[in-house]
Image: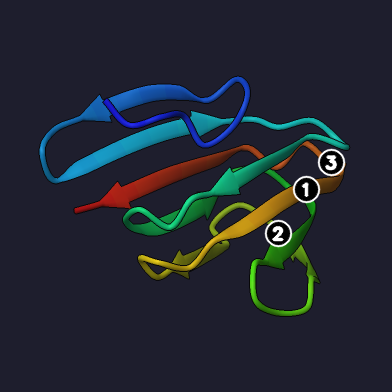
Amino acid sequence: MPPPPGPGAKLVHDEWRAHVWDLTPVPGASHRYAGLMDTVVVWLGEGTVRLAPENGPAEELKVAPGTMRYIKKGARQTETVVSGAPREIIFELE
């Protein structure tokens, strides 16, 4: 089983090609995308997150239900919740 992407993440689906996590971080909480797999993040809640890639400038992103982001395998970044409770479903794809 892969390591969770952050504190409080619940593994809701696990098979050889995909791992699916349900995560509701709180303001100030951070989690890291390790870059081990292609990853698709779908936000289910509203808020603002700060995305800090390992090799690039950080950006703030306002998210709402349905906002999606693709993170290519090998790309590492840290996500920190600035405001709200932006629940997200994280799809890690082999």
Among all residues in the image, which is located at the extreme left?
Answer: 16
Which residue is under mark 1?
A: 80
Q: Which residue is more in the foreground, 58 or 68?
A: 58
As measured in the structure, the alpha-carbon distance from the residue carrying label 1 to the one carrying label 3 is 11 Å
Please give left or right for residue 48 compared with residue 86 in the image.
Answer: right
Vertical comparison of 1 with 92: above or below: above
As measured in the structure, the alpha-carbon distance from the residue carrying label 1 to the one carrying label 2 is 13 Å
Identify residue type, mark 2: Val
Vertical comparison of 31 with 60: above or below: above
Q: Residue at x 70, y 79 (%)?
A: 56
Among all residues in the image, which is located at the extreme front?
Answer: 55
Which residue is under mark 3?
A: 84
Say few, some or many: other residues with alpha carbon within 10 Å of mark 1 (under 14 / 14 to 19 / 20 or more): many
Which residue is under mark 2?
A: 63
Identify residue type, mark 3: Gly
Q: Residue at x 46, y 29 (%)?
A: 4
Among all residues in the image, which is located at the extreme bottom?
Answer: 56
Would you say the residues marked 1 and 2 are in contact, meaning their CB atoms lie under 8 Å apart? no
Secondary element type, mark 1: strand
Q: Position of residue 74 (x, y in %)?
A: 40, 67
Sequence-earlier tag: 1 or 2: 2
Q: Position of residue 17 (x, y in %)?
A: 13, 46
In the rendered image, which quarter contains the N terminus? top left
Q: Position of residue 68 (x, y in %)?
A: 51, 63
Say few, some or many: other residues with alpha carbon within 10 Å of mark 3 (under 14 / 14 to 19 / 20 or more): some
Would you say the residues marked 1 and 3 are in contact, meaning their CB atoms lie under 8 Å apart? no
Place residue 38 in its image quadrant.
bottom left
Identify residue type, mark 1: Thr
Q: Nearer the viewer, mark 1 or mark 2?
A: 1
As measured in the structure, the alpha-carbon distance from the residue carrying label 2 to the one carrying label 3 is 10 Å
